[in-house]
Every structure is written in structure tokens, then in C-alpha cells.
Amino acid sequence: MKKAILSPLCSALVIPGLGQVINQHLKKGVAILAAVFVLLVGFTVHLYRVVQTVMMSGSVSLEDPASVVRKVMEQGASGLGVLLALFGLLWLYAVVDAFFGGM
């Protein structure tokens, strides 16, 4: 594999958007990096709210961590799943685009 293809591909595998920056597609790379940041913040805020709701409900105790995880998954699984799916699609796009952009 050419060195010009391998570097952006490996970078995109680790940090989505970095491969585009290495390929000198700065606007696209910054846009992907910003989208990853927004998804990360959205995931964190959503998870915090779900955990806070579960803990405030009083239906679980900290002595049984499995019940806490089960309640969190029941409460916020759909929203968290959507955010993870969006991140996965964005990551896949970034890797494929970095590969073809380096050719």
C-alpha cells in the first residue's frame, strides 16, 4: 500500500476527520471533527440525563450495579443507540473518504 494512502487511512481510523486534514481537505476534515465533537457532547449529555433520571427515581440502589445498568438501558437505549449509529456512520464515511482521497 502506498505511504500516501496509509497515513490518512490510519489517521481516520483513530480520529475521524484527521485523514481528510492530512489529505489537505481542510474544510471537510474540520466539519467531520466538529460533527464528532457534537455527537460526543450529545451522547454525554443524554447519558448524564438518563443516569440522573434513574438515580432520582429511587427504584435502584447502588449496591446492585446491574440493576442500575439495566434501568439506564431501558430508559435511554433508543437515544443512545441513535447517537452511536450516527457516530458509526460518520466514522465509516471518514475512513472511506480518507482512503479514496489519498489515492
Image (spheres, helix red, strand yellow):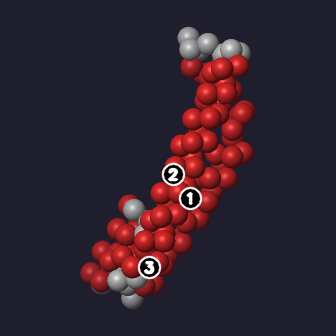
33 or 7, which lies in front? 33
Instruction: Determine the secondary structure under disc 3.
Output: helix
Residue shown at the point (40%, 82%) measured from the top left: 25
Vertical placement of residue 34 versus 74, above or below: below
Above-or-below relation of 103 to 48: below
Using the numbered discs, state the Cα–Cα distance from disc 1 to disc 3 in whole angstroms: 19 Å
Taking the image as shown, residue 92 lies to the left or right of residue 86, namely left
Residue closest to the eye, 77 or 103: 77
Task: Tell me residue 54's x, y (percent).
Answer: 66, 25
Give the amino acid type for the residue marked by disc 2 in the picture. Answer: Leu
Disc 3/disc 2 C-alpha distance (Å): 20 Å
N-terminal of the pair, mark 3 or mark 2, is 3
Q: Which residue is identified by label 3?
A: 27
Q: Where is residue 5 in the image (x, y as percent from the top left)?
A: 34, 81
Number of residues whose C-alpha sits closer than 10 Å to that of mark 2, classed few (under 14), some (14–19) or many (20 or more): some
* Tags 1 and 2 touching, CB below 8 Å: yes
Query: Which quadrant of the structure image shows residue 101?
Result: bottom left
Residue placed under numbered mark 1 in the picture: 87
Q: Do the residues labelled 3 and 2 touch (CB within 8 Å)?
A: no
Can you tell which of label 1 and label 3 is closer to the viewer?
A: 3
Q: What residue type is labelled 3?
A: Lys
